Amino acid sequence: MRFYRNVLSLGWLSLAGFSLSSAELGTLPDADLRNSLNKSSAEWKFPCPEDKIASYTAYHISEPINIDGRLEESAWQHAPRSPRYVDIISGKRAIHDTRAAIVWDDENLYIAVRVEEPFVRAKFTTNNSPIYYDNDVEVFIAGRDAYYEFEVNAYNTTYEAFFIWEEGYERGGFAQVPGLERAKLKPFNGVGFTTHPRGKRLGSFDWPGTSGSPFPGKRTAVFVDGTINKDDDRDRGWSVEMAFPWKGMGLLARSDKRQLPPNEGDEWRIDFSRFNQYKEAPPANRNVRLADSGGWVWSRHGIWDSHIPECFPRIRFTTNNLAMVN
């Protein structure tokens, strides 16, 4: 998700006959959520209800995963699946089904996402193109003082960015990392939630190094159950398979020196989302509070912004083997 989507979200409201300012857009969440935002400064300060943040247990596996996008391995058949994604703002059930699953071994974090899509579309074919202008799948992985953004479309074209909390930049030792010199970073203050208690971030959008990626060794694949950009037939959708090497997460683990791979019971915050260039048709979008924003997530954020690690699902890692559990 990038800030451009704020403009797009205002656009669909205008087309539906509503006139809202960007400030009003941030007030769309329901009364309970607004009340949570009005609590004293000593209490919860984020737009997602704290008691509604999703939790998940990721099991260890011993069998290999073939990254081909088909999700045919036994691990994907038995791993717990997320609930159906909901609208990022309202939490309303999305019109198409999307679910994710997570497993891991001592080398990689594996993520699978199944996307229901009757008309699969994509246009970008060069990595680090603005994938957020396509229908895409997104994953954010957060460390204590930094987080990583990953996006992919149905062509398996990817977009990546890396964000560091400005107040943790020096403390976390990021200033000493080649390619992360402050002059090479761009200031970023969120999308819809611009009053984050931690303040601003520094974004790296042109990753240094020969790999051109924050994750050397990262592997991704997409399988399309249908046809891309051919609307005279009906598609079932597409699936994404990802392998993120633990050794590539050193910058995320840098500040708190968390264990890589994780220990039993370690918790990471990882966000899962899907953004579309279409929205549910009228009359569904006439109710502003429940209208389809075009952004769907595993765990509701309550505002048009993916960049809130406190709202990311809590992923607990267990060394228990998935095969033994099932």
Image (cartoon, rainbow, N blue to C red):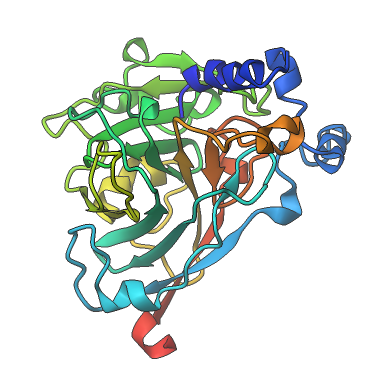
**Residue at figure coordinates x 22%, y 42% from the top left:** 156
In the displayed structure, would residue 286 be above or below residue 67?
above
Q: Is residue 281 left or right of residue 63?
A: right
| Foreground pick, 288 / 49 | 288
The quarter of the displayed image where residue 17 is located = top right
| Foreground pick, 224 / 176 | 224
**Residue at figure coordinates x 51%, y 29% from the top left:** 168
Q: Is residue 244 visible?
A: yes
Q: Is residue 23 left or right of residue 31?
A: left
Q: Name the image quarter holding the C terminus.
A: bottom left
The picture places residue 151, in percent across and down from the top left corner, at 35, 37
**Residue at figure coordinates x 32%, y 17% from the top left:** 181
How many dots with numbers? Answer: 0
The quarter of the displayed image where residue 31 is located = top right
| Foreground pick, 160 / 124 | 124
| Foreground pick, 280 / 182 | 280
**Residue at figure coordinates x 14%, y 34% from the top left:** 211
The picture places residue 161, in percent across and down from the top left corner, at 35, 29
The picture places residue 308, in percent across and down from the top left corner, at 58, 36
For this orientation, the residue located farthest to the front is 232
Q: Is residue 260 visible?
A: no
